[in-house]
Amino acid sequence: MPTREEWAVVLFTLRVAALGTAMILPLGVAAAALLAGRRGPGRTVLDTVFSLPLVLPPTAVGVVLLDTFSRATPLGSALAAAGIQIAFDWKGVVLATAVMSFPLLVRSALTAFEEVDPRLVGLARTLGCGPLQAFFRVTLPLAWRGVLAGTVLAFARALGEFGATVMLAGNIPGRTQTLALAIFHETQLGHDDRARVLAGVTALLAFLALWSAEAVGRARTRRAA
Amino acid sequence: MSLAPSGARHLLCAAVLLIALATGRAAAAAETMVFAAASLADALTEIGRAYEASSGHHVVFNFGATSDLGRQIRAGAPADVFFSADRAQMDAVEQAGLVRAADRRDVLSNALVVVVPARTPRRIQSPSDIAAFDRLALADPQAVPAGVYARRYLESIGLWARLRDRIVPTLNVRAALSAVESENVPAAVVYRTDAAVSSRVRVAFEVPREAGPPIVYVLAPLAAASPAARLFADELVSARAAAVYRKYGFIVLPPR
């Protein structure tokens, strides 16, 4: 069984993953809505940029984030002057996990938006809806399952993020240590039994998250059939 | 359109759930955060527990490679006290203006040993026998103090050129120890104090202190540290702490 400290790590991991996912939810939906139904090079470029964190080594994303938010940079020092510390702080964990899980949300939401019959949106427009109104009253209500499934998927990805997190936030027990980092830390110290316990907890959480994403998705196909 | 409100409600529920999960209390700030070399883990944990019991202050440790910790502190990591396994990393933190020269204390020294798995011990008669291992774990010899000390020693006895391709670099000295404990690597160079806390390794060779590079552990509270953090930094150089360091095999340097 996990110890008290390990439960704290579990709770911390759930919190940063949730906060990161909550941060990217409006951004990801907006990005997907922007791309949906468009064609041409603009869309391809944006689609590729949004998907980059899926295929880049997480450590490469970590370098970019560290270069952006370290105190040695203008942005980082401006934030530090305002009392906001990103690098090697829990906010860094949130940022790293958010960036890494962003593509999963955008891609799921994009697919869901494009499954909505464009005639329905067109109909709403002819009935006097503005583009925003049509989105909120027609597209989103029809596509919400896909958005929700993407959100859960992004949350699951955030739970397990390692590479970008360790680069931007380090591995500070009680401050920035998530489950993925704790597993690595314990094996480095030769505490394989603790690492196994933590890996078990992580597997359980990931299973629950994926299962609920799957359940939401299944309901969607059943309804569509 | 009956789906519309239900769908929106579901999404709203998800958002509320996420925010509720996220807005728990963040890590408490009223505690002393000590960034310390991995080799100090056992001794400092013991000193910290005793101090917490007697003072009521809360002390949190971040043990890792000194080079990593120094880099993190320079990037603004929330450290109150830095306990470095070499002078170079403390120098870098001081040059960044984060530690005052007057606050620095040379506290400890240590010795290097070659360890082998306790179940399959191999003897080393002379330093040159170290070259017989097909792989040798070291804390990263480019950056981490334990690895840098080990590399300097191996260079000084003329073995580095032969061994460098057989080095397994690890993140910190305890990871080098653990690689031998798990018998994944036949030998490692670690501190004498690391070997002493493990029953799964045996010391095959101890580097005589006069033959090895001078090893110095430097302690300093950060310039911005709270009075409570400074109190704990004082505790770490107290006679009580010295007794604990000696118990774990460290060499306590005389105060200035």
Image (tube, coloured by chain):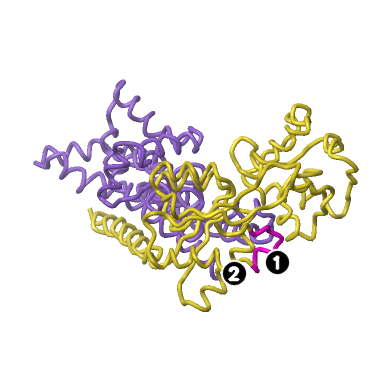
Give the residue type at disc 1.
Lys
Chain A drawn colour: purple
Report if residue B101 is visible in the image: yes
Tag 1 residue: B247
Q: Give the residue pinned by disc 2.
A: B239
Residue A106 position, x and y percent, is 36, 40
Q: What element carries label 2?
A: helix
Question: Where A18 sits versus B138, above or below?
Answer: below
Circle 1 SS class: helix
**Residue sticking out furthest to the top:** A41
> Between A212 and B252, which is closer to the camera in this rendering?
B252
- Residue at the far front: name it: B256
Tell me the colour chain B is drawn in.
Answer: yellow
Q: Is residue A220 magenta?
A: no
A203 vs A80, nearest the viewer: A80
Which span of residues is magenta-colored? B243-252
Left or right for B81, reference A151 = right
Q: Callout 2 environment at 10 Å: few (<14), some (14 to 19), or many (20+)? A: few
| Residue displayed at 42% across by 41% down | B95
User: Picture coordinates of residue B251 (x, y %)?
Assistant: 68, 57
Q: Which of marks 2 and 1 is nearer the N terminus?
A: 2
Chain of residue at mark 1: B
- Labels 2 and 1 share a subunit: yes
